Image (cartoon, rainbow, N blue to C red):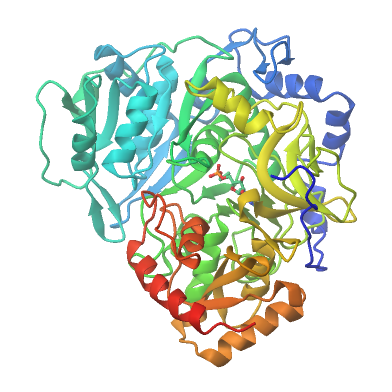
Amino acid sequence: MSSDGPTIRSLESEDRRFPPPDDFAASAVATAELYDRAAADPEAFWLEQAREILDWYTPPTVACDAANPPFFKWFTDGVLNASVNCLDRHLAARGDRVAFHWEGEPGERLDITYRDLHERVCRLANGLRARGIGKGDRVAIYLGMVPEAVVAILACARIGAPHTVVFGGFSPDSLRDRIIDCGCTALITADGSWRAGKVIPLKRNADAALESCPDVHTSVVVRRTESEIAWSEGRDVWYHELVADQPAECDPERMAAEDPLYILYTSGSTGKPKGILHTTGGYLTGVAATHRWCFDLKDDDVYWCAADVGWVTGHSYIVYGPLANGATSVLYEGAPSTPDKDRWWSIVARYGVTILYCAPTAIRSFMKWGTEYPERHDLSSIRLLGTVGEPINPEAWIWYRTHIGGERVPVVDTWWQTETGQIMISPLPGVTTLKPGSATRPLPGITADVVDARGESVPLGQGGYLVLRRPWPAMLRTLYGDDERYVDTYWSTYEGMYLAGDGARRDDDGDYWLLGRIDDVMNVSGHRLSTIEIESALVDHPLVAEAAVVGRADATTGQAIAAFVTLKGHATGDESIIAELRQHVATKIGAIARPKSIVLTDDLPKTRSGKIMRRLLRDISENRQLGDVTTLANEEVVQEIAGMAESARSSEGS
Ligand code: PRX
């Protein structure tokens, strides 16, 4: 980041407005009064939330301890157990309530009540203790979307053993690196996991990883796909055998609020993933409160967060938030296209899902597939939609509201990160007037800002760097084993502010528009432009399903805009479409934003969680050797795009 560069220029305007429906507002869980209460004294507000929402052995009397910034602590004198908050305390009043409607990809269905879940968690927790695993020991979890994944997470929480969940799509090397970095002594995995009709060989991957992890003395194996697997006597133990004779009650560990709950790895700007450390009391307060507010959670809701438990969204909004709130959720194992592209909508109709939370990338896939799939099912149960993970372009937002939300329901665009633990910027659905593409406002108790390179707030209407000006309960406490990198990455750019790494703009009303990562910001002829705005303009064209834009080095203009575009329905394009798209962007945003090159492609390089890997597109655009591809899910498209980019470069327009 240069010290005196211009702030990010933001050129697009979006003027559609959606105030909350009257009946929704009238019975909303979160009301406008929360903002005032929080603003009056944010710390007292969070302390009140912590004491109100959670069950404590010893309720906290202090909010934030800022004695040693940026190593903030929350609720330090409180004592609690996360699994007790997610399970035990619901048993008396709602033990028979369904915690999860689980659906396996091949079609199995299972309803798991809070009582069932409690029993399963206790048995596994006892089983882990029987293997010598206890408070402070780190346990890796490498599973697909099976109920045992939730059970494993909560069993670790019950005995005070921090978990590190590794997404089931990661390779043996990635698993190994995380196990070693985290010093895990146990692993919970499965013989396999179903995805798009195929078995992901989790156990085989885990075996390969464990060859270099001599400290792992126990590998618990869930039987899921009945695949043939190798067995290491002494180390490996079947899950069903481990839990078979264990008691159905398990004495929970009493944890200090600041005891670690989990470590979750996420990629940073270097090749080495960062181990984000979350602790117990603040994290649970943050996720439980925001889950209620943002999703307007009511007793009869059926909530579905269609993320994977391997990502932070799964941790906070499949496991800890919803269970702390006693919610009924859906858990689906597999791909949205198996056996057909209407799988999600059949699930929504079957369980009467009322709240759906997913990523823009999923929505854009659905747009690409066409409306016939949602139209096959009755989606009228849906009353609220949410998105997370990337900026959502207004057209995808409108499509989601129209074709999934029946043109009647609020759509909450929630901004947050693995590091923040909880949702930070989001509408309150009964209060906020929605704008497609805007995450709107910081939640009550959260203080965000948009600053320039010197760290000064930029005026409304301008872009800059998103920062958080006050600590919040679910914030990361450090990077596991690397305090220095924690300070450097987040706290060293500006004094006393957390640097999120995203560009943002506040409009004249003060609403936030996320503009993508700082490293996705381009500088063309001295103008800074956000890749996402150009992507939005491209996706706004009726033929376009998905677009990714990167800046590539250019001798004349500094950077040039290179776009990669997938057309709807796999239509093939030609030069005239490319010319039309370039012109479309120029019309939407201005000539300055006209892409220098556009490559039409069947697919874009993505991570296994579905994020477009713009970094690789940048490498391709600049004709460089590809950087780290370990998280790339669809390697084959990269070669294809590289060839096309080459010919685009030689024939590009001005
Ligand atoms: O760039 C922002 C983007 O995702 C980043 C965080 O990624 P991760 O830690 O993997 O967590 C994803 C799930 C919380 C952010 O720095 N991001 C997340 N949500 C949004 C978003 N960008 C724009 N709008 C959002 N709603």
- Work out whether residue 49 can be spotted: yes
Query: Residue 289, percent across and down?
Result: 67, 33
Q: Is residue 487 left or right of residue 431?
A: left
**Residue 626 vertical position relative to residue 12 in the rendered view, above or below:** above
Query: Residue 564, percent across and down?
Result: 52, 72
Q: Nearer the viewer, residue 199 or 103?
A: 199
**Residue 608 vertical position relative to residue 73 in the rendered view, above or below:** below
How many marks overall? 0
Residue 515 appears in which quarter of the rendering?
A: bottom right
Q: Nearer the viewer, residue 15 or 622?
A: 622
What residue appears at the point 24 percent right and 43 percent down from the top-left corner? 202
Check the picture and name the quadrant holding the C terminus: bottom right
Query: Residue 291, percent across and down?
Result: 63, 39
What residue appears at the point 75 percent right and 30 percent down from the top-left corner? 497
Q: Looking at the image, which residue sits at the far bottom?
A: 576
Query: Residue 372, percent across and down?
Result: 49, 78
What residue appears at the point 64 percent right and 26 percent down from the top-left corner? 285
Q: Is residue 93 left or right of residue 500?
A: left
**Residue 600 vertical position relative to residue 642 in the rendered view, above or below:** below
Q: Is residue 343 left or right of residue 215?
A: right
Check the picture and name the quadrant holding the N terminus: top right
What residue appears at the point 80 percent right and 63 percent down from the top-left corner? 18
- Work out whether residue 142 can be spotted: no
Residue 525 appears in which quarter of the rendering?
A: bottom right
